[in-house]
Image (cartoon, coloured by chain):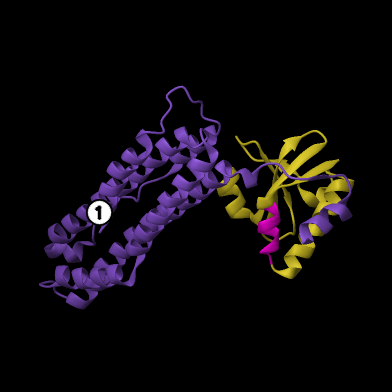
Amino acid sequence: MVMRASRWSSRSATKLLSSKENPEAELTAPSYRQLAADIVLPPPPALMPANYNERLPVADAAFKKFADEMKVWTEGVRDMISQMETIAPLDPPEATKMLESVRDVFRKLAIDTASQATREQITIRAAQLAQGSENPQKAARFIRRRFNESADAFLEQLAKIDTRLTTLIWDTDPEARGGPSFENADDLIAYLNS
Amino acid sequence: MKLIASDRFKKARAKLPDDVRTAVDEALRTFMKDPRHPALHFEKLTNSEYRTIRVDRKKWRIAMRGDGGEFELVDVDRHDKIDRKYG
């Protein structure tokens, strides 16, 4: 599931954007770049306690694979947003539609990642990895917690990306700029209530 | 003092609970009278064109942009979301 997201973001987004790119366009929102740089990838999984040493190589390899997949996925989306930031100011109505369709796909993938099925897979995988340990139940609980922590950290990054996409959409949306002006608070509030 | 009401702000305000909407209106009245009123905590977000004022002491803020005597109302949301969106 995670790899599917990565392939989508690196290939479809490039195709989606290539016809719209304008190398001479200037970014109007430099803060987006800074925000992109602020995305922190989930930390590498911590080593397991010494009393689980016999399962350490297996569990550690599984953690690493999980973290690597998340890293590929996140970098793919970050790259996509970087391209979006370049084209977003060019053609507001078109860019807004494009960004909205990207966000729809992104949200579906994010929901898949956060789904109950993923949590159940984590539980099953943790139980498998704990087999052979001195205390399988305790080991499974520990491994499951580590996996869930990694998944939660990843979901936090997804939330940041979703917020950024939403902001990009709003900044390309003509509704977000301009409007009637008021010098009297009562008139303003009456308009807002209308 | 002149305030521009964008559609985004109007929609965001319309979604608020009644008590928060009332507080937003009160903050706007205060802002139009005295933008530097201490209760508003009028401030510029770091590295951003946006400024914010407090709606209440808890969590709600109004985001706006502009300078001098004219500001465009952009959004109203919880302060952490305002920081993430516009900061």
For label 1, the residue is A4
Residue at the top extreme, as displayed: A24
SS for callout 1 = helix
> Overall secondary structure of the magenta stretch?
helix
Please identify the quadrant where the C terminus of chain B is shown: top right
Measured as percent of width and height from the top left, residue B55 is found at: 74, 56
Report the side of A48 relative to B82 (left or right).
left
Q: Position of residue A43 (x, y in %)?
A: 33, 50
Specify the amino acid type for callout 1.
Arg
B12 sits to left or right of B67? left
The colour applied to the residues of chain A in this rendering is purple
Front in this rendered view, residue B72 or A35: B72
The part of the image, by quadrant, that contains residue A61 is: bottom left
Please state which of residues B27 and A48 is positioned toward the viewer in this rendering: B27
Could you say which chain is coloured yellow in the image? B
Taking the spot 25% from the left edge, 47% from the top edge, the residue there is: A7
Give residue A146's quadrant in the image: bottom left
Q: Quadrant of residue B56?
A: bottom right
> Residue A54 appears at what percent x and percent y?
11, 64
**Residue numbers of the magenta segment:** B9-16
The subunit carrying tag 1 is A
Q: Does the magenta-highlighted stretch encompass residue B14?
A: yes
